[in-house]
Image (spheres, rainbow, N blue to C red):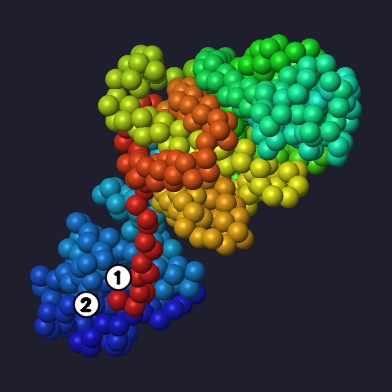
Amino acid sequence: MAKATDAPDAPDARAASAPDDVSSQNNDTIPMTGNSNTSDVENETVKGDQNVLSVSSDEKQFQKNNNNSNESVLEVETDIKKENRNEIQRDDRDIIFDNKATGDVKDDVHDASCVNVKHNNYKEFDDVIMNDESESGKKNNAPSKKTYQDSAEALEEALVQLGHFGLYQRYALFLLCIPNLFSAMYTLNYVFVADQVPFRCLIKECEGQGSYFGNDTIQELLPEDQCRRYTPAALDQLSCAREDYLNTTEACKSFLYENMDTIYAEFGLACNEWQRTLVGTVRNAALPFSLILTGYTSDGWGRRTAFCIFSGFAGALGIIKSFAPNYQLYLAMEFFEAALGYGFNGAAYVMMVELARPSLRATFACATGVGYGLGGVLFAFIASRVPYWRDLLRTIHAPALLLPMYWFLLDESTRWLHATRRTERAIAAIRKVARWNKITLDEELLTAAGKTNDVEVKSEGNPWMSLIRSRVLMLRFAACSWCWVAAAFVYYGLTISSVSLSGDKYTNFALTMAMEIVASLLIMMALERFGRKRSIFVAFLLCGVSCVTPYFTSHTGTGLGLFFVGKLAITFAFNSLYVFTTELFPTGVRSSALAAVSLVGRLGSILAPQTPLLSVPVQAMLYGACSGSAALLVLCIPETRRVPLPQHVKNAEKLRAPEPTLSIPISTHL
């Protein structure tokens, strides 16, 4: 018998195998000699009666039984050797159909059992094979009903069905990016509101009780120390001549300022630099309280509730702060405005992350970073046009009074609703998104997502206690905390230093905040392409090198360029930590964990406003050491790229990036 070959393509013909040569129609029997490795059977239409071939491998021959009836059966039993054991192995029989559109059928049967094939009807042949496979448990081509371990898995599948980036996701992303514009203004307004104003001593013996700042006659009576003046020769003298003053100096009692645009001038903070830097420290010291309050409110009452409450506080207290009559009251209002108003941005960020699919989290984080950077650039523009601090505060805080209207514009986080067993509201929110995106959802999937696993909820208990009892998550919490401390210290330190650079302070600040936009665009590309861990590690390392290197070079332009490189790198790392941290902890404590890690990290932002009191080389060494140590700790944290957000502590403990799937093409010619 000739060696079997692949059957040619035919539009309506399918066969498991076909011989090269077929005996004539009139032969009663077809002898077969030898042991054939492969055999092809080609069915032909016989005019008149229908013939069915039956071949037995034990007898090694074909027998043709022609009954007077319209149909007879020929049983075929043969052993076919598998041609590619590395690719396909079957226990019983498994006929794989490839390229069904063209009718090309590949036969790969191992220990095949008897198959009854109806002659001249290839469609029924397929049905026989598929039904037989179904009975033997080989349901390769038939869809199977998927089961879910718990409702959390079903919820994730339902969220995937809502679409990649539909109309509702774009709508929510736009609304949640707007608060980032205001967040930059509220967080960094002290950079301009408490900025230092040029000043000098008031020489009453020459100027009386009043004069103007640019009086050139007074310059000879002032030493290099701005806070001191030459001692007059006589107590009651009225003279502007240098010879009427001794060479000894005394502390100034009154000062003249170039303008009264900031609290530094209006509250008389000249020569009390610590009082000026204390404004930023007090604000950042209030943030831990804000983060605790935000985390408790957000996890207990909902992300949307926390956002609306704290955004209202931000607008109202900011306006009240603008009416402060003295330094002490201003400082108190700065604390309360930060403690009660800062949290709206964190609640909005958590809502955004929980809305995004795993592959889009970095993109959504990029959008928030762009919004924050644009807010900083816009703030520099507003501050240059509205320099007086009271008017400036009223201008930027008034729009926040409209943010509580988000209660009517956005739905609560679906993941939070599900995690807190508000499944009916969660399913309703999913259906609303599906209507917006014009997507039909699987009702069985929604039913599975709406089920509450009482056993799992009961065993989980208090999510914070479960987190504290988890050694893995506590070590992860400690590593994240130091990364936040380092990032906050370097980020705010470099931002505050930007207004001290040569040139226009508004332009320098705008350029510094523009690094937020560039860093956010890099985040979108790097976090998904290279992963969270690797990207943040490189960013911290680059920042440390950029901060230290300028003090080994003498070129001024090089130092300025490296300053902006360092600011870009630390901005990238800081913004990426928001994405990274929210992916590392379970849903029940995600907002609180982010708040707690950020709370510890605020130690860096509390210390950063005091860095202007240090020498520049000391600042650089501190920035480099913090960035380098944080880079090493990032290596101890698991990768979370494209990993579903963990619902519970046990899921968070087992976090690991999915192994890359390699698609290996299999040749159709076996």
The residue shown at (46%, 33%) is: 485
Is residue 403 among the parts visible in the rendering?
no
Q: Amino acid at mark 1?
A: Asp
Asked whether residue 206 is in view, the answer is yes
The residue carrying mark 2 is 38
Instruction: Residue at 16% x, 69% y: name it.
Output: 79
Q: Secondary structure at mark 2?
A: loop
Give the left or right position of residue 589, taking residue 349 as reference. left
Q: Quadrant location of residue 452?
A: top left
Corner quadrant of residue 407: top right
| Residue that carries the numbered disc 1 in the rendered image | 107
Q: Say which of 303 and 47 sits in front.
A: 303
Query: What's the mark number on residue 392?
Result: none
Q: Using the image, determine if residue 86 lies above or below residue 642.
A: below
Is label 1 in a helix, a strand or a loop? loop
Q: Position of residue 46 (x, y in %)?
A: 39, 78
Residues at discs 2 and 1 in contact (Cβ within 8 Å) = yes
Q: Position of residue 310 (x, y in %)?
A: 66, 18
Residue type at the position of mark 2:
Thr
